[in-house]
Image (cartoon, rainbow, N blue to C red):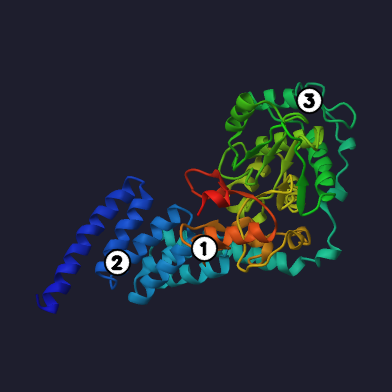
Amino acid sequence: MPIMETEKSNISRAEEVKVLANEAFKAHKYAQAIDLYTQAIELNNQNAVYWANRAFAHIKLEEYGSAIQDASNAINVDPKYSKGYYRRGAAYLSMGKFKEALKDFQQVKKIRPNDPDATRKLKECEKAVMKLKFEEAISAPQSQRRSVADSIDYHSIDVEPEYSGARIDGDVVTLDFVKKMIDDFKHEKCLHKRYAYQIVLQIREILRALPSLVDISVPDGNHFTVCGDVHGQFYDLLNIFELNGLPSDDNPYLFNGDFVDRGSFSLEVILTLFAFKCMSPSAIYLARGNHESKSMNKIYGFEGEVRSKLSETFVELFAEVFCFLPLAHVINEKIFVVHGGLFSVDGVKLSDIRAIDRFCEPPEEGLMCELLWSDPQPHPGRGPSKRGVGLSFGADVTKRFLQENNLGIFIFVSFNIFLSQLSVFIPYLSQ
């Protein structure tokens, strides 16, 4: 068949596959849509629409790194194709990279000056960039910053006589208080801000005293429960406790990060977990996830929820306390548990993790970033992260890390926008 006819056939077939991909996208089958758009691109990689559509599907799966790459390819194919800039700007915006997003939406505005959605996104980015510049202008060095906790005296806050919710007597958080608070939350009643302050300030001191990597000892014959992302799903959390029992010294839990965002009851979730930790520090262990950060909380809902249900001061207080959460745990010297994953280099020791200065917002690179953001991949070696932060790592990388640190099992959260679940890596089962 002549080359021209082959090209025409490929172009025609690519359009047919694109139609199937669009149908999968409309059915919310985003992974399937990505596979089909990939087939279309393989048949005709000079169609900017295919690249931009696949970028949109990646955005739906929160694979922002892949979305940025695809959108950039769309722009390279057709620099005047506005959706390429729009998709890339949307991905940057979702990552909290407002300055990069602003440039792309400005370009969309040039190409399509009357597009109302582009105008709205542009104004959103301009407002966010102005706020960033203002915060940078007034910010003090970390060592000179005054903690918001220093300005809070919960003892001076009066509790109204008509308040019928849970109360803390004195300074001790008891099981009776936690049970009453949970029952109030189930009936959509708020905890008085005096007691909310008391819990968060008390957990602040407990967490601040912990190392970045916490060692946990579980006696032989005892059980220990590790839980993945909760993401504001308060009633799912209650179901866990219904099935497995409440946290206690005899029934300990480790919640492996991402307590908040997405769900509508993130405040209830975090106050419940914090209250159990205050009640008995050895009954529950808490690790930081990538959503325990200002940038994620601003985009995915926790900041707005706290501001609505409590106050701006609580927004600042939670942001500070999240910086105190440990980054990783080791159970019985053999089981390594972390929210994200492993590292861009070999040779990282547990001592390196212990030495991380975690009292800050997550950086965009380095060990702390990778502990919170990295994801496993099905093939060996390392690769770029689909999410645009951290990296992807294979089973061979995991085996080397475990061997070098005399560990036996690696527990982490497998990322999927529709299902966050714990995954367990055991070397001899992964040959």
Label 2 element class: helix
Residue at (74%, 69%) from the top-left corner? 137
Q: Which residue is mark 1?
A: 385
Query: Residue at 28% of width from left, 53% of height from top?
Result: 22
Q: At which x and y percent is residue 37?
A: 31, 60
What's the distance in space between the residues labelled 1 and 2, CA to CA?
Answer: 21 Å
Percent position (x, y) of residue 171?
89, 32
Q: Label 1 amino acid?
A: Ser
Per the model, the C-alpha gap separating discs 3 and 1 is 42 Å
Q: Quadrant of residue 399?
A: bottom right
Give the left or right position of residue 302, taking residue 103 as reference: right
Q: Is residue 106 left or right of residue 320?
A: left
Question: Which kind of residue does numbered mark 2 sit on?
Answer: Ile
Q: Is residue 286 above or below residue 394?
A: above
Label 2 sits on residue: 41
Provide residue 404's location: percent of width, then percent of height.
Answer: 67, 61
Q: Which residue is mark 3?
A: 175
Q: Which of disc 2 and disc 3 is earlier in sequence?
A: 2
Amino acid at dot 3: Leu
